[in-house]
Amino acid sequence: MNASTKPVRIGVDIGGTFTDLQIFDARDGRIVAYKLPTTPEDPSIALVEGIKTAGRRYGFTLSDVGYLMHGTTIATNAVLERKLPAGALVTTAGFEDVLEIGRHYRREVYSIHPQPVPALIPRNRRFGFHERMRFDGTAERVPTEADIDAVITQLAAVDIETVAVALLHAYANSDHEQRLADRIRKALPRLDISLSSVISPEIREYERTSTTVLNALLQPVVRAYIERLGARMRAEAFAPHLLIVQSNGGVCTPATAAAEPARLLLSGPSGGAMAALELARQFDEPNLVAVDMGGTSFDVSVVRDNRLEIVTLSEIDRLPVRLPMIEIRTIGAGGGSIARVNAARQMTVGPESAGARPGPVCYSRGGTEPTVTDANLALGRLDAATFLGGAMALDRDAARAAILARAGDPLGFDTDAAAAGILRLTNTNLAAAIRVSLFEKGLDPRDFTMLSFGGAGSVHACAVADELGIRRIIFPVDASTFSARGVLMADIEHAFGRSGVRRFDGSAVAWVRSCFESLKAEGAARLEADGIAPDDRQFELSADLRYRGQAFELSVPWGEISLDDDGIGEIGLRFHAQHAQRFSYASPEDAIELVTLRLAAIGRMARPQISAEQPSHTDSPTAGRRSVYVNGQWQDVATWRRDAIRDSLEIVGPAIVEEDYTAVYVAPGWSLARGRDGHLVAVNNEELA
Amino acid sequence: MTTLDPIELEVLRNALTAAAAEMDVTMWRTSRSTIVREMLDYSTAIFDADGNNVAQSARIPQHLNSMGYFLRTILDRFVPADLWEEGDVIISNDPYCGGQHLPDIAAFRPVFSGGRRVAIVGTLCHHLDMGGMSPGSYAANATEIYQEGLRIPPSKLFARGVRNDVLWRLIAQNVRQPVAVMGDLQSQIASLGVGVRAVEILTARYGADTLIASCSAMLDASEAAMRDVIRAIPDGAYEFEDFLDDDGIDVARPVRIHARISVTGDTLVVDLSGSDREVPGPINATLGSTSSAVYFAIVAAADRPIVPNAGCYRPIEIVAPEGLIVSAQHPAPVAHRLAPGHVLLNVLFGALAKAIPGRLPAAYYAVSYVCSFQTMEASGARKVLVEIEVGGCGAHPDGDGASAHSFGMHNNASIPIEMIESSMPITMVEYGLAPGTGGDGRHRGGLGLRRAWRIDSQAATFTGQMDRFHFRPFGLDGGEPGAVGHLDLIRDGKAQALPSKISNMPLRNGDVIRLVTSGGGGLGPPSERQASLRRRDREQGYLME
């Protein structure tokens, strides 16, 4: 029985604190969620444990599992913690320092001791290769055998596991990189090799070199993880079809992940964005701003016209990564963000976070500084007894004492006012992040519905929406494991790019065609290897274009347009229109330049057929009432269990809706009801100002 | 005055900063030129009703603090506050009306609530061209401001929402790339509109009184923080000086920049009277430019983060008699006003280092290496490349200086080699660190860099505007100075040294221009450098080869 015929498909999202699972079982058409603490020493431990435990709870065996879709931060963490093996870099001779100099501007304008990010490969392991390619792919200097030998000798003399090769203009002609790689493979077979012409064949030497170096250093790391995971699964006789989540929202095979691990680097928040896209389509809400608030960070992604925005350059810890990824804005604001008051009686919230350890004061794990979670608990928005489904008792008195001592007394406030101040500052910070995310794309928050998920966000959603003039919020089912649902719904995706700066007119037709054909052949071969049937393959071409003289590009989807003179004219028109939308002007009289051609080769996975979830029937739909601090006073407020909310019920704020790992605070002026598939929808009923 | 809720004050502070950021995004999103999009050479700010800067979004240090000086001068000397009406947009680029140099146009718009002025919003943008004798309005051989371009005195470009079409056309008619320039000016106006709306929303929500009182409290808080910083500096007078190589007109005469900083309690006086007179060449700075360097130096030198706003400036007095290189008077040319600004920053750090040892770095390269090429092909096609390069940062008490990294008064990104070669007939021959250029010391100065351009077209011209070819970036506390920079023409295999300021030098096919930039000064005696760091420097090839 192959993967597509087995009944169970699992999406796993491994975060810093929790490992989240969403499990689809075709036998009853339901999706269930499970959550357990992450095992940082080896994340595969919690992954396999979680699947086994969930199987016992929900009635499936390991042999029922077909696809296992896996989101992992293994590559991300290795870079952040610099737990990377020794490697070497080969560049065009005379340009060995490009990696160290970078783009040489500083981030902190007032800094008097700027510390540029150290090069991941030091100067004495960066070797110059006597060759030179021109921008048009012709060679100015062809390397001799002696030139190649010289590099091999240098590589053989250093103690390394992996080598990156990034030569000038290799995106236009990979011949010199390939020739060198062939010889390295023969002479030094133990080394991993990453070529810039394979990993990121795009113009701009620093960004391409940085991406290639990251890839080279991650190859041994990711391969070792996949081997460990494989061994652990074999020990359990567990043999699912494993797929790994990439930064662009698609999944890839373990073999691709091990060869091109840089593609995983920014995959952490992509699961949430993918789930948002899926939900936007289901709900017929083409404009959705998705906000994911966890313990330490707040991620904003934007679905516009049923599409996620893809960017082709991002960075990790100040190191550029030039690969396609979902555009996500992250700020350091979460439940663990610390509130402080300075000598000038000025209160700040974050970006310092208490993280999971010591965590908020109320976790009783040694935290002493009040956090956003402490403030929510202090004001009754969270419940000490039911947090994490009652798995973790919270110390409300300790939270209130810390808020009074660290924030209230310095400000001359009582505990309630100080806690309300923490929440108010948090909400305005979150709203500002959302506003800028939309604003920079030329969009208005009032045209959007908010989608709130993550463990810490739903208590803030109404207040943040009020700040922005957003009048509708969706709280999805299993909000705290929502990212894992995005993982569960992913398709296989291989992304390719080829740079070749040229005028975008009839003269580009031949190059575009041949590029498209070769990329498509490459993509088809990859999908064949993935076991994707021809009918399930899809190829999406796009072109990165700019006005001549500009130094940045816009990506224009090619869609169904023909690859000829007329097609290029049509794509040009779309470029003008897209430019006008994002930058408020177009210059139809100016020449357009093509910089990079991109192809996404997508292998469509069968969509789980989910049957609508029914609320469980309980005798008392209202869990109870408790005292909650609302608009400056304590009020007796109704609390509901989420799974008890039926179709006919309308909950009017102020109210609290509790679920296992999170709580929704329905603010005054808002009402909430059960919508499609069990997702909750809150609406602001107040007259527009 | 109403008592302010500290939470509300913080919410308003964040909201004003967010409003400046929204203005910033609007500028970026709607502008036309690469100077805005790539070099990010613009700023946006929000001022209180009296013109004090309360929130700013700035990317280039020279812009920080500069708009406030400009606005103050306009209000005091040209357009008094009671003449500002709802819907007005007031612009100027004139260095002798509070500005810095002609390419920078500042635009301001007042915000009213119930007929009362509650705030002013402003934008500053470096424009592609303002006319004058050379493209980009950056002539290296101008000797009076009339040669540098169009001067716009403080004027209402919009009066009560109605555009002054005569002024608009006058500008468009006098600049080289009117579509880009007027487009960027349009972006400034759009950005002001966004700022006005943001402040109006805040006023509607919190009330004009609260907004005004909050702005005042924010200024007071930064002033108090700045006074704390100054109080921690021992009372006394601290002097330092350094030199610019020359002004490009009289190449035999160095130009002195001298500062005497006097600290008394919580106030600080920066006396620049010992600096040289203004010079014929375009390396003069107006007092507006000089103030930017002074304020930047003091805020950066503070031992704690300070929210930068106009309150920071209150405890600082600048003394500079008219007609010095740092207080140039009409009609001195000022296009390269950053040249004395860079050196002044080093001088101020040098003086402050005597007062607060152990906090400040040794001298950085302190020059914007402006390299401009125009290639000419047989077909007659001409293409222009302008690059601004950097050098090594000074060693800091906490460690070695950064190598080849933007520091001080500017903040430039490099241009990718592959982009240059794809767009014009130039091939880069080398690009890397310059070993041995960092001053030795307990902490070593950062390395300068090497960059070389080969001309592949039939002919070309080269214009260079740089400095630090004679005077080495100084070391501190016994550290060695960094190396000077140099510029060579390599023709037919033979190298020939070029001066630091050179205009329209003809080049031919195969010629190579090679620049080596200064390293930073070292800090502390070289004898105290750790053996392990020396070993690393040797292994990594950071020392002279």
Image (tube, coloured by chain):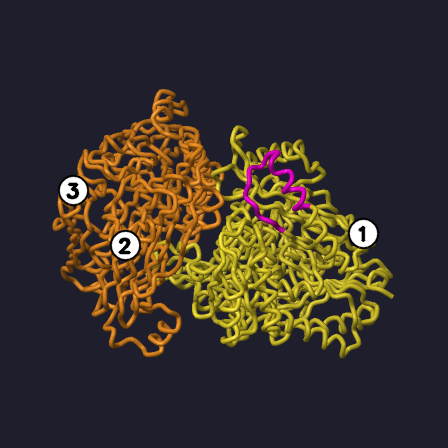
- Callout 1: helix, strand or loop? helix
* Residue B486: mark: 2
* Residue B278: mark: 3
Question: In x, y percent, where is residue A361?
Answer: 52, 70
Identify the image quadrant of residue B543.
Answer: bottom left
Residues A188 and A686: in front is A188
Chain letter for mark 1: A
Q: Which span is picked out in magenta?
A: A497-516
- Callout 2: helix, strand or loop? strand
Q: Colour of chain B?
A: orange
Residues under labels 3 and 2: Cα distance? 25 Å
Q: Colour of chain A?
A: yellow
Residues A382 and B160: in front is B160
Question: In x, y percent, where is residue B156?
Answer: 33, 27
Q: Residue at x 56, y 73 (%)?
A: A161
Q: Residue at x 69, y 40 (%)?
A: A559
Say above or below: A535 vs B179: below
Q: Which residue is mark 1?
A: A534
Chain letter for mark 2: B
Mark 1: amino acid = Pro
Say above or below: B39 vs B265: above
Question: In x, y percent, where is residue A172?
Answer: 57, 50
Residues under labels 3 and 1: Cα distance? 76 Å
Marks 2 & 1 on one chain = no
Mark 2: amino acid = His
Binning the other alpha carbons within 10 Å of mark 3 as few (below 14), some (14 to 19) or many (20 upward) gives many
> Where is the C terminus of chain A found, in terms of image quarters?
top right
Question: In x, y percent, where is residue A174?
Answer: 58, 55
Residue B131 located left or right of residue A89: left
